[in-house]
Amino acid sequence: MLEQILSDIVVSFIVVAVLFLGVLLISNWVFLNRFREDVLYLKKGQDEAGEKKVEELPKALVTYLSKVNIASQMDLKQAFITYEGFHRGKQKGPLVPVKGEQFFLTDRPAYMWMGFSKLNPVIRMSSLEKLKPEEGSSFTRLWSVFPVNKASGPQVIKNHRFRYAAEMAWFPQSFVHNNSLIWTESGEREVKGEFDGVEPLSYTLTFNEEGLIEQVQAEERVRDGQKERWTVHYSNYKANQDNVLVPYRVDTFWNTANGDVHDSRIFLKTVHYE
């Protein structure tokens, strides 16, 4: 009798495990498919837009574009990247492993991002972010199944735009293509960028002695409902497969009253232009 009960328990456990695994696989497929569909939607919605002339940009940006060798890729207005690294999901939490894929339009502030993070060997979070010129949203699910959080609205758009600005060094065509951004020289090796719109967003690019972008800083990015300074550092510049010089390491920090909080450490794996 006891053996039969134990056998039934084992069989039930196996059935439940198989069903749960099936749900995870299906949910993951749905998650990936949603990302692909949104990327296709962004591509189809792209139309011809005017662009700046390189010589109209601040001198530091003109020098930078020459240094990174973007001329041969200037006509391409889409970028796709993959990366891996570490990200701090909670303000006082640890840095946890993360992998991401991201699609950008270079002629307007628009992207689709898909990321997977591991909080521990069992807990895995799946996240999607979407930015269009007048729309921004994000959501996270546990194992791609159970909703954890969801956000949209004006503040999400602002934060996503700051992220887009911080990642333009991976697709430098955007400094010429994107008419949503206005550039002004603010120092010998500094350029101020401002998103045009009802509520302008501004940030500062700092260039190193070689003429490459060394840092981006936003004074008022929101975290947990509070405006704080957000700083992005770029390093390990290398030529990608299209022979464009891009940073293969990016570190982000929240500059709080209690000191700097290392928010993420990202290592670029691939970047491709279309």
Image (cartoon, grey):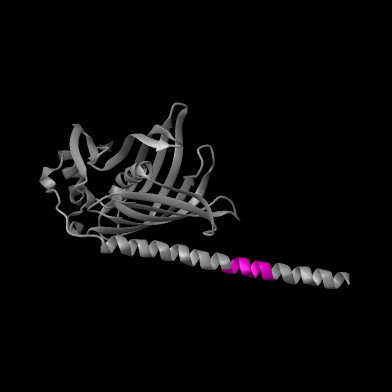
Front position in the image: 166 or 179:
179
Question: Residue at horizontal 51%, vertical 41%?
Answer: 90
**Magenta part mainly helix, strand or loop?**
helix
Question: Residue at horizontal 23%, vertical 36%?
Answer: 192
Q: Quadrant of the C terminus?
A: bottom left
Count the labels in the image: 0
Stretch of the chain drawn in magenta:
15-22
Quarter assignment of residue 239: bottom left
Q: Is residue 221 magenta?
A: no
Quarter assignment of residue 218: top left
Q: Quadrant of the N terminus?
A: bottom right
Q: Position of residue 113 (x, y in %)?
A: 39, 55
Left or right: residue 251 versus residue 42 is right
Q: Please say if 78 is above or below 67.
A: below
Q: Position of residue 166 (x, y in %)?
A: 32, 44
Q: Position of residue 216 (x, y in %)?
A: 31, 39
- Residue 68 visible here: no
Question: Residue at horizontal 41%, vertical 32%?
Answer: 255
Q: Is residue 16 magenta?
A: yes
Q: Residue furthest right?
A: 1
Left or right: residue 82 versus residue 64 is right
- Residue 20 visible here: yes
Q: Position of residue 18 (x, y in %)?
A: 64, 70
Q: Please say if 263 is above or below 26.
A: above
